Amino acid sequence: MANTQTTANHGTTHAGRRISTETKASFKTTELIAYVVAVIGVLVASAIVDASDFGAQEAWYYITLLTIGYMISRGLAKSGSRDFYDDVPGNDARH
């Protein structure tokens, strides 16, 4: 549904367009926060535990797996969803 606005010039109305970006920016999502917390958790665990039980090599392996999972989840999120906003003439702010 388009928004209409009355202009001060001649009292005419212009319909605003409904525009979308692909998805929200990654820093606005909870999955980024969960990813960062999980990576920090793996790094802290590898630093606390004895190297023979869970060393740096295993930690970076799990971080790599977390990164692959995060990239796949962002790809799936971007593939089918949209972030809609109205393009109102004379207003550059997104809603």
Image (cartoon, rainbow, N blue to C red):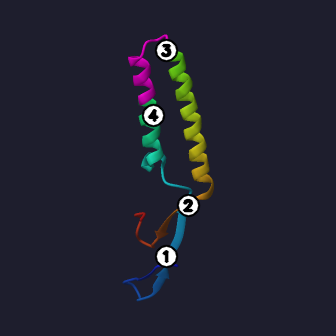
- Mark 3 is on which residue type? Asp
Q: Mark 3 points at which residue?
A: 53
Q: Which of 89 and 64 is in front in this view?
A: 64
Which mark is nearer the camera, 2 or 4? 4
Which mark is nearer the camera, 1 or 3? 3
Horizontal placement of 10 versus 21: left or right? left
Q: Which mark is residue 16?
A: 1
Residue at 54% across / 19% down in the picture?
Answer: 58
Q: Residue 38 carries which label?
A: 4
Q: Mark 2 points at which residue?
A: 82
The local crowd at label 4, few if under 14, some if 14 to 19, many if 20 or more residues have their Cα within 10 Å, is some
**Quarter of image, res 90:** bottom left
Question: Residue 92 at what x, y percent from top left?
Answer: 42, 64
- Mark 4 is on which residue type? Ala
**Quarter of image, res 64:** top right
Looking at marks 1 and 3 on the same chain, the residue that comes earlier in the sequence is marked by: 1
Q: Nearer the viewer, residue 29 or 92?
A: 29
- Dots 1 and 4: beta carbons under 8 Å? no
- Mark 1 is on which residue type? Gly
Magenta-highlighted residues: 41-55
Q: Which of 80 and 2 is in front in this view?
A: 80
Please, is residue 80 above or below residue 69 in the view? below
Gap in angstroms between the C-alphas marked 3 and 4: 19 Å
**Quarter of image, res 88:** bottom left
Residue that extends furthest to the left in the rendered view of this protein? 8
Question: Residue 71 at what x, y percent from top left?
Answer: 58, 40
Q: Is mark 3 on a helix, strand or loop?
A: loop
Which mark is nearer the camera, 3 or 2? 3
